[in-house]
Amino acid sequence: MKRKRVIKKTDDGKLEDLVGRYFRAAAESGAQQSGDFDSEGVFRRIQAGISGGARRIKMQTRMFWAAAAGIVLLLGVLGIMQQRPAGEQANTVMAERSAGAGETIQVTLPDSSVVWLNAGSTVSYPATFASDKRAVFIEGEAYLEVQQDPERPFLVHTGKVVTTVLGTSFNVAAYAADQQVEVTVLTGKVSLSTTSGSAPGTLLTPGQQAACTADGKLVAFRENIDAAESILWKDHKMIYNGKRLSQVIASLEHWYDVKIIADAPLYGCTISADFTGEPVESVVHVLAQLVNGKAVRDGDTYRITGEGCTD
């Protein structure tokens, strides 16, 4: 037989003590800066939602703890809201756009900056930018044309890597499967840094490209490149020039909506090829030939095997 429990007045007392201590601590720390926050009203609504007024409600023990967890979650949300500066509260509403398999889309941001998303990529951004900065979050690959605003730097977050610009156009590739962030500058200047700010930023100018690990460690820097090649995907052109196999695979997986797996020694092989308009079956077999390997298909998964490339 399942054991049941009656919520008594002592439980209400514990709840009241918990909520009371929270708001007293918030008041002492100056967190309740809004001035209009009704702590007693919040407590009454929490109490009414659990106890149903003065009634005693029988519930299973696990339901009691579920309600308690809900209170903790609510208090946590209230705490975050109060600790956030008043100017930032208006920016908590986020918008998100994603490009599906085999498509690219164009997104216009609140400041009229434009983002082009490659297949399988996502951009998240505030419905209204803050007064001191413009921050967006990108997963996958995107080309950005940023409106100039010296008083509000434009920040692109890709995991722990932050790209800071004032007004420029650049491409950022940050597919999770590739485990690297690659930034190519077409116009203007950008600075690569980490969210922790533990290391000085890397400055990039037109024709320069940098790649770093997911945690911000610089692993490659190239100059005098044809930066326009980095955004050929905007026109559905699948041209790769000197790209690592891991980068090519990450791009192809999102474009064709398939899974491609390669033996570990192959991922560092360099690929130069034009796959525009080609079916995925042909693309994978050409990739295998370029790395002196073989390709096998199993459903929607392709596997490339081999001992490694010769370059």
Image: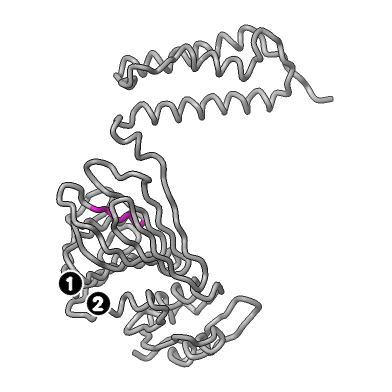
Relative to 222, 51 lies left or right? right
Relative to 231, 98 lies left or right? right
Colour theme: one colour
Instruction: Using the rendered image of the protein, determine whether residue 306 is visible from the camera's viewpoint.
Output: no
Q: Is residue 34 magenta?
A: no
Q: Is residue 116 above or below residue 46?
A: below
On the image, the x and y values in percent for residue 28 come to 31, 15
State the mark number for residue 46. Answer: none
On the image, the x and y values in percent for residue 170 come to 26, 67
Q: Which residue is more in the foreground, 188 or 161? A: 188
Query: Whole-Å distance between the Cαs marked 2 and 1?
Result: 8 Å
Instruction: Using the rendered image of the protein, determine whether residue 4 is visible from the camera's viewpoint.
Output: yes
Q: Are marks 2 and 1 in contact (CB under 8 Å)?
A: yes
Q: Which residues are magenta?
A: 154-158
Q: Amino acid at mark 1?
A: Pro
Q: Amino acid at mark 2?
A: Ala
- Determine the residue positioned at 65% across, 15% down: 51
On the image, the x and y values in percent for residue 282 come to 53, 89
State the mark number for residue 227. Answer: 2
The residue under label 1 is 206
Image quarter (top left, top right, bottom left or bottom right) of the N terminus: top right
Mark 1: secondary structure: loop
- Determine the residue positioned at 34% across, 20% down: 32
Mark 2: secondary structure: helix
Relative to 121, 88 lies left or right? left
Q: Earlier in the sequence, mark 2 or mark 1?
A: 1
